[in-house]
Image: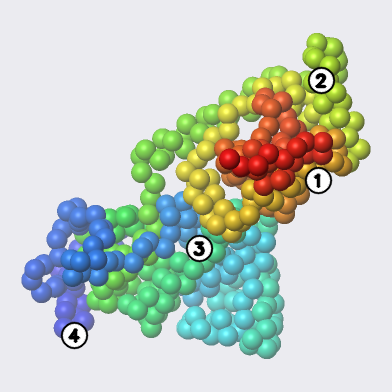
Amino acid sequence: MSRWSFGKGSVRARDFGGAITVRCDVPKPAVSAVSAVPPLTTASAGDGAAAPPPFLLTPRQGEAARALLSYVAALPLNSVDAQLLAVVVGIRAARTGTGNLTGTDLRSLRLEDPEAAVAELSAAGWEVSGELIDGDPDKPAGIVVPGMTPGQGHALPLGKEARSKVSGWSMRTRVAKPVRKSSSGVRLAALFLAAHASAELVGHAPAELPVACYGAVPTLLEKGFLAEVKGQTYRLGPTVGHLAGLFRTPEELAALAREEEERLAAREAAAAAEATPESWAAWKADVSPALLRHVEAVENCRLCHLAFIRVANGFMTPPSPLPMPRSALDAYDTWRAAHPESGREAAQFTVAFRTGHGHGPSYGQLCKGLGWRKLSRELRGVIVRTLIDEGWLTSTPPVPWTLRPGKTAHAQGIVLPGQVARGGR
């Protein structure tokens, strides 16, 4: 059995993914077996122990981090320098297809051969400006990443917040104290192993772990980034536990599967019930005069110019329940904190919209008109339904295009023309 010497400690070789598996010799009490690692807990304020920092990523963001690393691992790159650089540029390019990097940024990565790494990216099809190496070190140079071009086939479709979180996690992992002065291979291995660790800080070596990263494992153990490696399983050290990528629980995965089934069923039902000019005319002939006036206001609105199929299906097809996934509810909390006056703004917008259009806005028209852009359909539904629950808005379900000020708005003097404001009790 081979050994490596690391000054105060030593490392024994076993088998890590067909190469090496290592474990640090530590003073007693010894590190417990990986399979028996207790969950990470938060110390209370009075127990004398410092509480561990919170995880940087949510399980969903951890999935994005792992997707980024899998994308990089599949690129035709030979050196760890190029792979580490690809991680940095790739997450910056995730939303627009272009990642900006300065010469100073490049130097701060402390690659063994930066020019060769840049050349590898160019050979892989990335469009790298020559200014990155020879230009102003403080001037950003755009690097076009073909796989990140917006549209179908995007390798890493991320929202703004998720991209920012994964980018921050990547940087914090690379500069974590145990590895910040280490080689590119050690830092790349740290990224992969942290991303694939659970909330209990335990992970399993991913199949796409670059070969060069195996040799970094002894260093990660010596520096404390890893507490133990056994077989293909490892445990993060406690000082870097907050970098774990996390995984969804079986219950969360089951809920996601149910939501996807509901979305598929809703799409199939909508397609089966698609309106025709004949069915639309027959439907209108059978509604009340008041509803017909509203229908024609929407159908003939010169400001909206809505397509026939959108109007007809909107009225004829009962709305399907919109799922409220945990991700949308979490995103709503962040969104609402940034829009504290959203209730008042929404109520006032419906008044102005009805004055010009003769009907209320749809959920999408409301959000777009207020500048609440780039919202998922689920998040948009959570926002509007919450405003309805709070009384800022009301509607006449299942009739579409009926949003208007609700009781809370009335109490604030926000009413439609011709209505009388009701004071609060």
Q: Amino acid at mark 4?
A: Gly
Q: Is residue 40 left or right of residue 337?
A: left
Q: Nearer the viewer, mark 1 or mark 3?
A: 1
* Tag 3 and tag 2, C-beta contact below 8 Å: no
How far across and how far down the image is residue 346, in percent? Answer: 69, 47
Q: Nearer the viewer, mark 2 or mark 4?
A: 2
Marked residue nearer the N-terminal end (3 or 2): 3
- Residue that mark 3 sits on: 165
The dot on residue 290 is: 2
Q: Nearer the viewer, residue 80 or 200?
A: 200
Q: Amino acid at mark 3?
A: Lys
Q: Note whether residue 4 is visible.
A: yes
Q: Is residue 249 left or right of residue 258?
A: left
Quote the CA–CA distance across marks 3 and 4: 37 Å
Q: Is residue 142 left or right of residue 165?
A: right
The dot on residue 7 is: 4
Picture quadrant where residue 121 is located: bottom right
Compared with 63, 8 (above or below) is below
At x 50%, y 45%, the residue is 329
At x 45%, y 66%, the residue is 169
How far across and how far down the image is residue 386, in percent? Answer: 57, 41
- Residue that mark 1 sits on: 352
